[in-house]
Image (cartoon, rainbow, N blue to C red):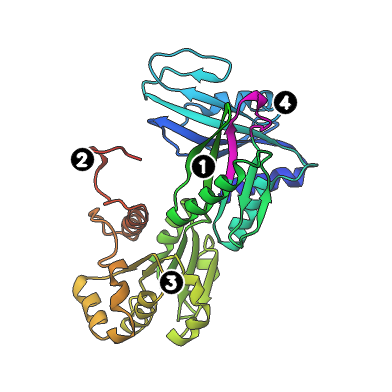
Amino acid sequence: MVSLLEAIENQERAGEEFVLATVVKVEGSAYRRPGARMLISSMGQSEGTVSGGCLEQDVIRKAFWLTSDGPTVRSYSTDEEGEASDSSYHFALGCDGKVHLLFERVTPDIQSDLVDILKRVRADMQQAVVATVIGAPDDSGVTIGERLILAHSGELKGGLRDDVIRPSVLADMKSVIANGRSRVQKYRGPNRSIEVFIELVSPPQKLVVFGAGHDAQPLVKFAKMLGWHVTVIDGRATFAVPSRFPLADEVRVIESHDSLLSTEELLDNAAVVIMTHSLEQDKNWLSLALRSRASYVGQLGPRYRTERLLSGMDESNGSEVTREKLHYPVGLDLGGDTPESVAMAIVSEISAVLRGRSGGMLMHRSGAIH
């Protein structure tokens, strides 16, 4: 989202139109999942990907031609066998999948509700749901690209000309928020079927790093490569210096546990890593993290050290309730011992845990990758 929005803002400053290509449905094997987006400028420059690199050139070449009459959906098949058609393109890649892309042109003189909600999600760091029509009969009165948007505040924008399906779509949008997963839904009516992509748009993953030592620097770099929102906190002003963490979104000096209580919302749904190398600081921040609504808490250091930190906490205040989120020693068992290796192990574990994965080898996975 971060790099895509930067590209969008560059196009807006230049007063240029562009096309957004969005993965709205996947059948079989595919590199990117629904919600992946790619921007194509009028000069043929792009940002983002919709595949592993096999479809992008064709998408760039056809984006403006395909959107000359408005939004449209095209599918790309990667089966070994198949035929191209007016609405489907065939690439014999042997991946046995089909990717459905929604192409939309955004022009400077017309407000884009989609672009607006993407910006709002990033600015507010709150989720939103976008329901977009991706399939409808020509005589249905509904057009491809119509959408309904539900912001975190409850504000509803956009519209669907089919009043019959609108209540059902809105109910499913709320269900997507509750379940935390996007989905494609078909709505059937008299002699017609309308297909809608209901997308959960999430802000960048938050990472809060307690500790501004040299080993925190590669952790910040790796996290930013993944597009995460990173805050670095340390009680030592000589460590928590913005120039030491130029990629971090924020660097704070907070000297005590009590000083952070007023900004406790920072830890809501965040991944937290504690690595100050100070027993006193680690104990303060670990205690706070375990009582917060963080989605992941990782403690650097050997197991016995963390057990020592835990044994000194007052469990009656709720620490025990959230210990299932605590990972120690933090990181996957990758075998490295350099700061960069440790950082890679940490971001890998966070990514796996937040996606409900074990972090094992894909070659040993019996089910589908996605």
Where are the magenta residues, as a range?
131-144
Q: Alpha-carbon neighbours of circle 2 within 10 Å: few (<14), some, or many (≥20)?
A: few
Disc 4 is placed on an element classified as loop
For residue 233, say whether it is visible. Answer: yes
The image position of residue 13, as x and y in percent, is 75, 47
Type of the residue with mark 2: His
Question: Residue tagged by mark 2?
Answer: 364
Alpha carbon distance from label 1 to label 2: 27 Å
Read off the residue under disc 3: 212
Disc 3, disc 1: CB below 8 Å?
Answer: no
Q: Is residue 276 above or below residue 146?
A: below
Camera-near label (3 vs 1) is 1
Label 4: which residue? 69
Task: Give, as a three-letter code, the residue at label 3.
Answer: Ala
| Left or right, residue 71 beside residue 2 | right
Give the number of the disc on residue 208.
none
- In this rendering, which labeled residue sits more in front, label 4 or label 2? 4
Circle nearer the N terminus (1, 4): 1
Residue 216: x, y in percent?
40, 65
Q: If you read the primary sequence from the N terminus, does the residue marked by circle 3 or circle 1 appear first?
A: 1
Residue ranking furthest to the front: 190
Residue receiving disc 1: 35
Q: CA distance from mark 3 to mark 1?
A: 34 Å
Of mark 4 and mark 3, the one earlier in the sequence is 4
Horizontal arrangement in the rendering, residue 87 relative to residue 182 (left or right): right
Q: Residue at x 66, y 33 (%)?
A: 142
How far across and down, in percent of the image, does residue 74 sit?
A: 56, 25
- Is residue 134 part of the magenta span, yes or no? yes
